[in-house]
Image: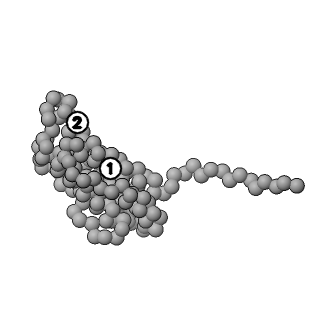
Amino acid sequence: MLHFAPEQPLDSAPQPYAEALARLASIRHTLRLVDPFGGGPASDPSADEEIGMVWESASESKRRCFDMRSGRVVAGSAAALEALLAEQSEGREPNPAAAKKIAEEIRAGLEDVSRLMFGRVPSRPAFSDALPIAL
């Protein structure tokens, strides 16, 4: 006689680090959009996977800090991209120095959250100051 084990229902809840990885992916996507204006090397996307692995063992305070810092980078990146696109839609070329500064801030933000999750001392948080360069 055949006995089948009951099927386990699929766990539809997202993995605990899924939102963290989605944030990093959105920041990296913004960097790719800004990069043609600002130039320079992009950060390593394989670090996202490593952060996902570290996320499981991260303390609640470290996760909250990641949320706060990555949220600041997401908001700053979105505002900066919006400003660049507004310049283009008005028929003006975005200021290259501003675009370069934006790309640097996005890279710094990615590095900051990576340092935080891997236990290295983070530098100044990205987008902690308003961008001083006029677009």
Residue 11 can be seen, yes or no = yes
Q: Which quadrant of the structure image shows residue 135? A: top left
Residue 132 image point, x, y percent = 12, 49
- Residue at left 28%, top 60%? 111
| Residue with the mark numbered 1 | 28
Q: Which mark is residue 102?
A: none
Tell me the kind of residue under disc 2.
Leu
Instruction: Categorize mark 2 by other alpha carbons within 10 Å: few (<14), some (14-19), many (20+).
Output: some
| Residue with the mark numbered 2 | 85
Residue 127 can be seen, yes or no = no
Above-or-below relation of 133 to 3: above
- Residue at left 19%, top 42%? 37
Tell me the kind of residue under disc 1.
Arg
Q: Which residue of the protein is positioned furthest toward the right in this rendering? A: 1
What is the secondary structure assignment of the residue under circle 2?
helix
What is the secondary structure assignment of the residue under circle 1?
helix
